[in-house]
Image: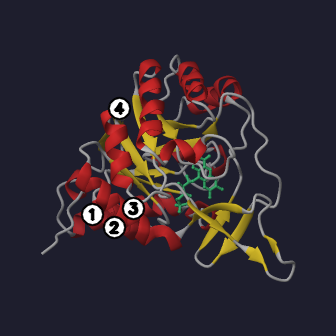
C-alpha cells in the first residue's frame, strides 16, 4: 500500500508523525521502535536561548488525559544544531523542528539558524499555553499570527507548518490568516488551557496554576476543529489531539487531515505510532482505497 503523503515540499513515507514535546528527540524511543518507520519526528520545542521551563510540579493526570505545564524546557537552538542534529540527520524519516519564541525576532532567529541545515520542515508553535510571554498569544489573533508567519517566511525557504491553538473561538479564521501569510501547512491542535486543584491542600496541582490538556479527552474537539479548518483552507492539515491508535488516525484523515501527530499516547505505549501505521495499511486495503491520499477528507455526509 502506498502510504505516502505530501506536506508542502515535504514527502512523508506515511502520515504518522510524533508530536512535539512527547517524543524527545526520537532517540529516547529507539529501543522500542524502528524510528525509520515513522512518517516524521517533530522534535521538542526549540527556542533561541536555553529555557529552564516551569518549576515542578508541572504534570497532572486527568480522566482520559493529562495537563502539562513544562514551559518549553530546552537547551536552545545552538545546542540543537551542534549536539542533536548531527545524530538525527541520518535517520530515514522526516525531521521537523518545532520552533517557539517570545517575540517575532525569536522565531526568526531560530529559523535563520536552522536554514543552513537539511532540516525537513519547521513547525512554528504559536500555540503554547504554558509560557508567560509570547507562545499562545501569537496564535489567538489573526494579525499577530500573520506577523510571525510573514517574518519567518523571509528567512525560511523550506516547508513551514504553523501549529494552531484550540483556545480560540474561530480556529478556521486563524488558519486562513496564516495560509494567506505564507504557511505551507497547519497543524492542530496544541493543548487546551486547563487546570486542576488538589482539594485536600486547596492549592492548584501545577506550579503554574494552569496548563495544557492533552490525550483522548480532547480528541472529539480536535477532530471537529480539523474538519472546520479543512472546510476553510486549501493547504494541508496535520491533525493532532488524543490519537491513541490507527482508528483515530483514520478518523482525523476522514475529517480532512493529510497527516497526523501522536503525542500523549507515546507515554502509555511507546509503540503506538508503528501499531497505528500497521492499522492504517490494513484499513486502506480492507476498504479498497488506492492509497493513503484517497482517505484525506473522505468522510461522507449523506
Ligand atoms: C509533556 C508535553 C510537552 C509538550 N511540548 C510541546 C512543545 O514543546 N511544543 C508544541 O508545539 N507542543 C507541545 N506539546 C503539545 C503536543 O505536541 C500536542 O499538540 C498535544 O499534546 C495534543 O496531542 P496529544 O493529545 O496526542 O498529546 C506538548 C505536550 C505534552 C503532553
How dense is the environment of label 3, judged by Cα within 10 Å: few (below 14), some, or many (20 and up)?
Answer: few
Residue annotated with mark 3: 278
Query: Residues at badges 2 and 1 in contact (C-beta under 8 Å)?
Result: yes
Residue 103 as seen in the image, left or right of residue 147: right
Using the rendered view, name the quadrant where residue 47 is placed: top right
Residue annotated with mark 1: 254
Mark 2 or 4: in front is: 4
| Beta carbon of the mark 4 residue lies under 8 A of ligand 1 | no
Q: CA distance from mark 3 to mark 2?
A: 15 Å
Residue 250 as seen in the image, left or right of residue 198: left
Could you tell me which residue is drawn at 61 percent across and 50 percent down? 23
Residue annotated with mark 4: 181
Query: Residues at badges 4 and 3 in contact (C-beta under 8 Å)?
Result: no
Could you tell me which residue is drawn at 55 percent across and 58 percent down? 191
Where is residue 195 drawn, in percent x and y? 67, 68
Which of disc 3 and disc 4 is earlier in sequence?
A: 4
Could you tell me which residue is drawn at 58 percent across and 41 percent down? 43
Residue annotated with mark 2: 251
Where is residue 224 drawn, in percent x and y? 35, 66
Q: CA distance from mark 4 to mark 3?
A: 36 Å
Amino acid at each position: 500500500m502506498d502510504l505516502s503523503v505530501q506536506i508542502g515540499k515535504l514527502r512523508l513515507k506515511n502520515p504518522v508523525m510524533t508530536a512535539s514535546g512527547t517524543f524527545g528527540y526520537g532517540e529516547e524511543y529507539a529501543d522500542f521502535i524502528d524510528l525509520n518507520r515513522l512518517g516524521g519526528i517533530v522534535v521538542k520545542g526549540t527556542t533561541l536561548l536555553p529555557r529552564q521551563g516551569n518549576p515542578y510540579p508541572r504534570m497532572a493526570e486527568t480522566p482520559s488525559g493529562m495537563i502539562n505545564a513544562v514551559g518549553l524546557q530546552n537547551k536552545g537552538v545552538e545546542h540543537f544544531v551542534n549536539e542533536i542534529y548531527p545524530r538525527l540527520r541520518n535517520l530515514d524519516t522526516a525531521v521537523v523542528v518545532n520552533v517557539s519564541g517570545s517575540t517575532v525576532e525569536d522565531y526568526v532567529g531560530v529559523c535563520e539558524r536552522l536554514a543552513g541545515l537539511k532540516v525537513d520542515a519547521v513547525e512554528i508553535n504559536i500555540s503554547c499555553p504554558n509560557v508567560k510571554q509570547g507562545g499562545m498569544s501569537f496564535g489567538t489573533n489573526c494579525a499577530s499570527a500573520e506577523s510571525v508567519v510573514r517574518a519567518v517566511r523571509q528567512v525560511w525557504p523550506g516547508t513551514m507548518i504553523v501549529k494552531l491553538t484550540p483556545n480560540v473561538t474561530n480556529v478556521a479564521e486563524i488558519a486562513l490568516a496564516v495560509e494567506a501569510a505564507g504557511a505551507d501547512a497547519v497543524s492542530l491542535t496544541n493543548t487546551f488551557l486547563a487546570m486542576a486543584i488538589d482539594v485536600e491542600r486547596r492549592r492548584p496541582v501545577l506550579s503554574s496554576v494552569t496548563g495544557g490538556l492533552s490525550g483522548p479527552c480532547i480528541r472529539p474537539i480536535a477532530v471537529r476543529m480539523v474538519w472546520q479548518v479543512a472546510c476553510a483552507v486549501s493547504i494541508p492539515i496535520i491533525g493532532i489531539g488524543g490519537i491513541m491508535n490507527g482508528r483515530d488516525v483514520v478518523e482525523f484523515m476522514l475529517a480532512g487531515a493529510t497527516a497526523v501527530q501522536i503525542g500523549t499516547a507515546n507515554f502509555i505505549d511507546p509503540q503506538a505510532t508503528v501499531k497505528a501505521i500497521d492499522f492504517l495499511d490494513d484499513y486502506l486495503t480492507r476498504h479498497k482505497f488506492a492509497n493513503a491520499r484517497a482517505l484525506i477528507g473522505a468522510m461522507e455526509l449523506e
